[in-house]
Amino acid sequence: MKQPRRSGRHALGAGAAYLLLTLPPVRHWLEASMASHMLVQMPLLVALGMVAVRLLPAGRRRRLRNGFGGPLACLTAATFASAYWMLPRALDAAIGEPLAEFAKFVSLPLLVGLPLALAWESFGLIGRGFVWTNLISMQVFLGWLYVAAPLRVCNNYLVDDQLRVGWLLITLAGLLFAGWLGALFRGAPASRTEAPMYKTA
Amino acid sequence: MAKNTYLPAPDHGAKTGVLAYLLTTAAVLLLMMVAGLLMRLEQAQMISIGANGFYQLMTVHGAGMVGIAGIAGAAIMWHFLNQYAALSVRVLVGNLALFVIGVAMVLGSVFVGNFHGAWTFLFPLPGNSLGLWSREAAAWFMGGMLVIGTGFLLLQLDIARAIIAGYGGFARALGWPQLFGRDDGQAPPPTVVASTMVTIVNLIALVVGASILAMMLVNLYHPEFAIDPLLAKAMIYFFGHVFINATIYMAVIAVYEILPRYTRRPWKSNKVFLASWTCSTLMVMFIFPHHLLMDFGFPKWMLVMGHVIGYLNTVPILAVTGYGALMIVFRSGIRWDMGSRLLFLSMFGWAAGAMPAFIDGTIRVNYVMHNTLWVPGHFHTYLLLGLVSMVFGFMYYLGKPARQARDPFIDRAAFWAYLVGSLGFVLAFLYAGKESVARRYAEHLPQWVPYDRVASYFAVLIIAATLVFVARFIGHLAHAGGHHTRATVPFGAVVA
Ligand code: HEM
């Protein structure tokens, strides 16, 4: 019975990490700059949602995925929910209004991380590659939007912070792309990602 | 070491999807050649369609030819790669469907919306039409490009999937264990190596292209989100240059696969071959600044890089492939037919077409030749005599009814007409370039007109020959899907 004990420990770890993120000092610290808010706290919340899914047994994951309406519906939900939290106004609201902050802490793991992880495991290299390449080009695009914006987009953050986020997004996109291509060079996904969605000739 | 014995490879017939690609290619090539002829006739002052019409034609000709070169190259790559790694027919067909939708958007933008800002959609032109076309027209053009790009992205992802499933990763598919270690003769076949290179560079190009297109679409409606024009130019040229270069790297697979069948000599993935493809994987991505040599605002190191890599990249694949083709044919006793002839011609076309670029990639020369007809002279040489010859060679090979089938006289005449027509046509461009005739001018000075007229006659010859090639392919379509031996047997060889 090694497996359940290990996943129990992981669940405990994930729960503790989540609680840590909700603690006011940690929250304030991460939300003090736009970069750590957008590029550390929010991705961590998404990641925790993904970790939570990995801890569920396979049958439950399948039922959950079907309940959501299949992998494409999962991906669409994750895309829309994450798009909302990219709006500068949503960032402002999360800082100023407790209800919005609560919505962020609930929706990022449950409506982005969870459906994304559910969709991910049923995608082959084509589906995953499509998500990666889109994510990367949209990240460059978003980074440029922040750099080129002619005004301050958030009431809570300064223009300097906004610029830094823009360049960080672009840099991150480059690193992610290099990492993804590097993985294809190594071919690590070969055995795992035989695309089940696409029947081959 | 790779073995030198030839193991006869079966001649598979083409799948319906590949034939659909080739039929689309034939139709678009012919139509776009006629568009090209109309442009030349306008410059020659033999017809009068006006500057507006000229630039509309130039936009669809550029976009259509680059797109169709991609479709034709993809058909060749898919047909042969599918024999080594299981590819998805659905994705193949999906790409063609997206291509058709994208082309419809582009045509609508040009002929309904009057967009005529050239296929390179160079920033800030699409958004600054001085009232000649609407924002919507520009948006439809760029949207069409995005749709076409999405189709190719899916195709490349499927190819990546199949290569990784079959060979365990890009590194192995490029033959790195054999290149950097001991050559155990187990390197992947040339088709797999070439397809891997194309997939890597196209994935990068398509992501960069999608990013700049999305930025330009926002800028179109919200110009206050400014784009650095030099950055935009670099991104567009990176995307466009890699994509069009990749088309010939896909099409050359026809040479690697078909010539050995005619000469009964193997095309080996030896260390030199592997090294050349690995070098070009990198270099093809850093060569684009040779288009920007006159943009003094660019960082100097980038221009130096474009200059140096422009020189270097001419060598590896081209020299290795050209030399390889000569060696495979030399004293092989090959019996020529239309397929092998066109494929052999393509080697000359590719090599000859690279030379003007090599020369123009020299900053001193570029001072004079930049933006002259020398540039269309270069790329029409390697595209018409290189890439298009490969495509028609492939079509002849597929459509050949039987090994002994002989080519009718008209086809052989069409081969020579195509060769003479293309040489005359591109030499007229090159000569005009030497005389400093600017490219992309709808109206030419009286002293330039004679070259335009000569070029127009040669263009008619090319189109006539192409009509014969296309008619023969359609006539032989029924054979193209069959699994029968096609290649002639060289003199002195024993029939298996
Ligand atoms: C009968 C064959 C062809 C004719 C008559 C023709 C004619 C022309 C002409 C007149 C131009 C404009 C030159 C200028 O003044 O700047 C042009 C540009 C171009 N052609 Fe062709 N062409 C032919 C075949 C091809 C092929 C086979 C390809 C590619 C596969 C191709 C790709 C292009 C491209 C990319 C441009 C650049 C457009 C631009 O400057 O925006 N052409 N062609």
Image (cartoon, coloured by chain):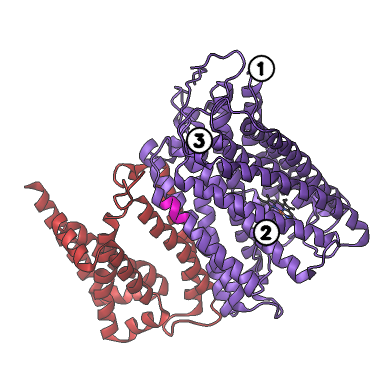
Chain colours: A red, B purple
Residue identifier under label 1: B331
Tally of numbered tags: 3
Instruction: Say whether disc 2 or disc 3 marks the residue closer to the N-terminus.
Output: 2
Instruction: Say whether disc 3 or disc 1 marks the residue closer to the N-terminus.
Output: 3
Q: Name the spot of residue B413 as percent of width and height, x first.
A: 73, 36
Q: Residue furthest right?
A: B447
Q: Quadrant of ligand 1?
A: bottom right
Q: CA distance from mark 2 to mark 1?
A: 41 Å
Chain of the residue displaying label 1: B
Q: Is residue B94 magenta?
A: yes
Disc 3 under 8 Å from ligand 1? The reply is no
Amino acid type of disc 2? His
Task: Please name whichever residue, B189 or B367, is drawn nearer the observer in this view of the structure.
Answer: B189
* Mark 1 Cα shell of 10 Å, populated few (<14), some (14-19), many (≥20): few
Residue at x-position 25% and y-position 69%: A109
Residue B405 is left or right of residue B430, and the answer is left
Residue B93 is left or right of residue B262, and the answer is left
Q: Which mark is residue B191?
A: 3
Task: Please name whichever residue, B461 or A155, is drawn nearer the observer in this view of the structure.
Answer: B461
Q: Which residues, given as a range, are shown in magenta?
A: B91-95
Chain of the residue displaying label 2: B
Q: Nearer the viewer, mark 3 or mark 1?
A: 1
Disc 2 under 8 Å from ligand 1? The reply is yes
* Secondary structure state at the residue bearing disc 2: helix
Amino acid type of disc 1? Arg
Residue identifier under label 2: B61
Residue B252: tell me if it is visible. no
